Image (cartoon, helix red, strand yellow):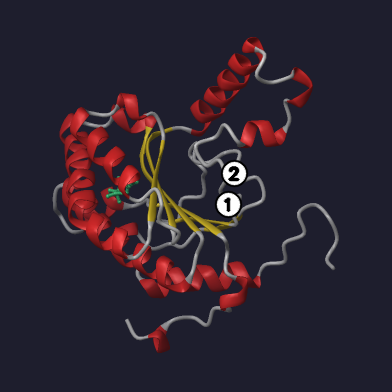
Amino acid sequence: MSQAFLAPVDPARLPRHVAIIMDGNGRWARQHRVRVAMGHRAGTEALRDIIRNSSDIGIQALSLYAFSTENWSRPQAEVEALMQLMLDFFRSEIDELDRKGVRITILGDRDGLPAAQRETLEQAQRRTRQNAGLRLNIAINYGGRAELARAARLIAQDVASGALDVHDVDEQALESRLYTAGLPQVDLLIRTSGEMRLSNFLLYQCAYAEFVFPQVLWPDFTLRDYHECLAQYQSRSRRFGGREA
Ligand code: FPP
């Protein structure tokens, strides 16, 4: 899409970390009278442009909620379709992502994934580990509460083994044990489809995020919508509990 059609965004004040809850695939499928798997497929198509553009404009980190720990309760056919889509996505996109310098990180419990998905994702993560461009985080089998419980467990282990003094258990100790260790906190959270919930996504990392809730269903989400969200973010006054400078 030509840049002329996009909302003006100040490149000097971009959010460092954007998180997206890609909601509305099911409703899109119902609207189009197709199977829900087709909605997720259309959602995957929408994703490509957003990743590419985030990398091009210099967003530091983009976190996508692809599959939550609660999504296993969906009908088996839908779960299988989503798993297959993720496999296809990584297999078809990895070369271009790597070429663009994108570094992929998986957020979530990989042990709970089918072997093919786990191997493909781990391979993508290994292959792009040295890349210095966009940090692309894919949350799969992810839950924010489970992530915090895991970090607490890792801290407890380190305290028990003597590697960490109990007096050094602070925010930094916790942050360094999250899946997002080393990444900036989320500046902008986008959830499409008009729903206004966090749904267990990046609970800790969103503490001071600005939230934008476009009405559009995820498969219809375009670069124009994305740049409107970025422009909205830039119109907000962020005080982090303090006073405006
Ligand atoms: C929510 O829509 C969306 C999901 C649960 C899955 C999101 C996954 C993708 C967009 C594709 C796969 C991702 C990658 C990284 C390739 P919903 O089905 O809950 O929508 P509804 O609320 O309208 O039913």
Q: Can residue 42 be spotted in the picture? A: no
**Mark 2 Cα shell of 10 Å, populated few (<14), some (14-19), many (≥20):** some
- Tell me what residue is drawn at x 46 percent, y 62 percent: 214
Q: Amino acid at mark 2?
A: Gln
Residue 106 seen by the camera:
yes
- 100 up-or-down from 123: above or below: below
Quarter of the picture containing the N terminus is bottom left
Mark drawn on residue 186: 1
Residue 32 position, x and y percent, is 18, 59
Instruction: Using the image as rendered, state which of residue 33 and residue 208 is in the foreground.
Output: 208
Callout 1, which amino acid?
Val
The percent position of residue 156, horizontal first and vertical second, equals 62, 16
In-image side of 59 versus 152 (left or right): left
Q: Residue 17, image x and y in percent?
A: 54, 57
Q: Is mark 1 within 8 Å of ligand 1?
A: no
Across and down, in percent, residue 146 comes to: 49, 26
What residue lies at 84% left-to-right and 56% top-to-bottom? 242
Residue position for label 2: 205
Q: Quadrant of the C terminus?
A: bottom right
Quick check: marks 1 and 2 in contact, CB under 8 Å? yes
| Residue at the bottom extreme of this rendering | 4
Q: Residue at x 53, y 69 (%)?
A: 230
Left of 65 or right of it: where is 152? right
Q: CA distance from mark 1 to mark 2?
A: 6 Å
- The secondary structure type at the circle numbered 1 is loop
Q: Nearer the viewer, residue 23 or 227?
A: 227
Q: Residue furthest top?
A: 160
* Residue at left offset 67%, top offset 13%: 162
Q: Secondary structure at mark 2?
A: loop
Q: Earlier in the sequence, mark 1 or mark 2?
A: 1
For ligand 1, tell me if the residue under mark 2 lies within 8 Å: no
